[in-house]
Image: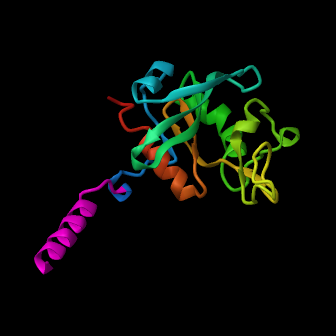
Amino acid sequence: MKKLVLISILFLVFSISCGVDNSEIEKIDKITPLDTIFNYDSLTKIGFKKSKSYDVKNLPQANSAYFGWKEIDTEGPKDFEIRIYKTHKDAISYGTSFAEEGAGEKAIIRKGDANWKEGIKDRRIMVGGSTGASGKGGGAPTGSKSTNKYGDYIIYGNLIILCEGRTTEQAMERCSQFVIGLEK
């Protein structure tokens, strides 16, 4: 019996040590200049699933913008907002202030305060609270509040990617996982 328990424990330890470890994923820089020009097809090839296309007429120099999700290792699907520019220089010059407005601790999640209002509802998430006495859904949970969905963003070549995460660190890990395979 002791041998069986010992073998089970060793098997469990071995299984855990061989699992996916996010610390093995190379962390991406906040800004990565690349000559490669990515497009929507580049995103779908790495598993990005579009939920919505945004109107970019009020997002200076942007070619397109999308809200969607991608499977992230063992975490499951996570949300991303992707903004595509003609060049890396355009993404930096015209998109940085809008990305800062949409992600991070100081993200603007109220339509009246945002410079680019398109998709603002997709940039927030409800946290806290309970479903109330009835236990039924149908609206925001009692005591809940809106907070920013995207913990941070990256500029990767001509892309600006807002990444879901409660913290900058978590969002940057997910950003790093998102771009795996883009340069292939």
Residue 16 position within the rendered picture, expressed as x and y whole percent measured from the top left: 28, 62
For residue 164, above or below residue 66: below
Q: Quadrant of the N terminus?
A: bottom left
Which x, y percent locates residue 164?
58, 46
Give the residue furthest to the right.
Answer: 112
Residue at x 75% of width, y 19% of height = 57
Residue at the spot 45% in from the left edge and 49% down from the top edge = 75
Magenta: main secondary structure: helix
Q: Which residues are magenta?
A: 1-21
The picture places residue 128, in percent across and down from the top left corner, at 72, 60
Q: How is the image coloured?
A: rainbow
**Quick check: 166 left or right of 183?**
right
The spot of residue 159 in percent (x, y) is 54, 31
Quick check: 16 above or below 29? below
Residue 29 magenta-drawn?
no
In magenta stretch: residue 8: yes
Relative to 140, residue 4 above or below = below
Image quadrant in which you'd find residue 54: top right
Residue nearer the viewer, 67 or 87: 67
| Residue farthest along the left direction in this orientation | 3
Q: Is residue 81 left or right of residue 39?
A: right
